[in-house]
Every structure is written in structure tokens, then in C-alpha cells.
Amino acid sequence: AAWTPVQLGIGYERPDAGGNDPEPTLEDVTRPGDVIQPTSFNSPGNEGVELAIDNSTSTKYLNFDKLHAGFTVTPGVGPTVVVGLRVTSANDAPERDPVSFTLEGTNDGVVFTEIARSRLPDFPARFHTVEVRFENPQSYRSYRLLFPEVRNAASAVAMQLSEVELLGTAGPPPARFAEFIATDIEGW
């Protein structure tokens, strides 16, 4: 995605306290082919980490590390602000379902900042999708998503899921375009 400078000639005033603002449309900021690295390569060849963001519920990501398994992904769309998470359960073995998550963001690939940590709603069936929303005003280039626990660690041999969606919006434009973005239209 590229930012294009534009000149806007029409503006309007909106009260600060406006409770009628529509909720922003959130989309999955990941795409098949985005750079994604697993927490380990302890997965079968046909159930690797890239399948977590392939937009298909007929595949799955399985990691035999079981606890604290997950991945780091860099959305190809550039910096994004993630405020939600969707996870879809896989085809079998409910004991392998993740039941909690930790999401962290980074802009340098070294220092990660925690964005959210929570329980996931229960998956009532196979291929069921659950969603969690959280506050996050900061844009990041990459995200680390870990699943610390599975439904039944005593009987599970792995952690598995069918699909993950990081819900958000594009982050702020690059600084070099800041001069083209006007916020004060009164003097126009």
C-alpha cells in the first residue's frame, strides 16, 4: 500500500463528544505469504506455521511444543494497529485448542511490547471461530502471538488451530507524507 498526497477542499466539524461515530471497520491485517516465523519448527511438514494465516479453515497449524507455541508475523501491508484477534479451532482433538493468548508488537524486531493477554472464549465445536477485542492505540510492524495454554495439557500432544486473524487497521502514514495530511481546515 502506498500513500498518495491529496488536497481536500471540503470539510466539516464534528463535536468531540460525538457518541454517534461508527465503529471503524476492522480487517485481518495478515495475508497469505506474509513473513511468519514459528516459535519453533516442531511441526509436521504439512501443518506448518504459514497455514495459520492462509485464509483457509481446511488447513491447520500444529506445534508439538504444546505450551507457549505461536509465531511472529510481519504484515505485508506495513505498520498496523491491531485491536482484535480471531482464532478458528482445527478439525480434531479439542484438547489441543489454545485457551489463552499473549499478543506483543514490535517496530524494530528486537524489543516487543505487550498489547494484550487474555483467555480465549471456549470453542463449542470444531472449525468454530472466537473473537477477542482489546485496546491498543499503537501501530507496529510485527506481532508475536503466543498461546501459553491448551485446553487439556495432560492429554494434548500439541497446540493446534485452523486460522488466526489479527484484526486492525493500517497504521499512521510514513512521516514523509505528514505535510500532505491536514487536520486544521478552518483556515482554508
Image (cartoon, rainbow, N blue to C red):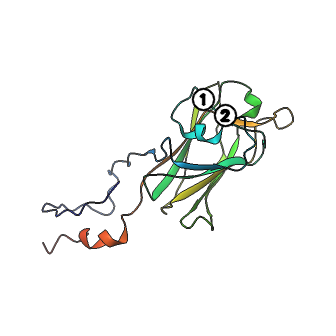
Q: Amino acid at mark 2?
A: Glu
**Element class at badge 2:** loop
N-term-proximal mark, 1 vs 2: 2
In the drawing, does residue 119 fall left or right of residue 2?
right
**For residue 45, side relative to residue 152 (left or right):** left
SS state under label 1: loop
Label 1 neighbour load within 10 Å: few <14, some 14-19, many 20+: many
Residue 58 sits above or below residue 6 on the image: above
Note whether 2 is above or below 125 in the view shown.
Answer: below
Residue at x 63% of width, y 50% of height:
37
**Along the line of sight, the residue nearer the viewer: 91 or 18:** 91
On-image quarter of the N terminus: bottom left
Image point (77%, 31%), residue name = 95
Seen from the viewer's position, the closer of residues 102 and 109 is: 109
Q: Quadrant of the C terminus?
A: bottom left
Q: Position of residue 182 (x, y in %)?
A: 24, 69
Give how far across and how far down residue 13 sits, in percent.
Answer: 21, 62
Residue 114 quadrant: bottom right
* Residue occupied by mark 2: 47
Q: Which mark is residue 166?
A: none
Pick out the residue farthest to the front.
45
Residue at image point 81% right, 33% down? 156
Task: Give the residue type that dot 1 points to.
Answer: Thr
- What residue is drawn where x is 51% and y is 61%? 140
Are dots 1 and 2 in contact, CB under 8 Å? yes
Measure the alpha-carbon separation of dots 1 and 2: 7 Å
Number of numbered discs on residues: 2
- According to the picture, the residue beneath numbered tag 1 turns out to be 59
Vertical placement of residue 176 versus 101, above or below: below
Dot 2 crowding, Cα within 10 Å, few <14, some 14–19, many 20+: some
Residue 65: x and y, percent? 78, 43
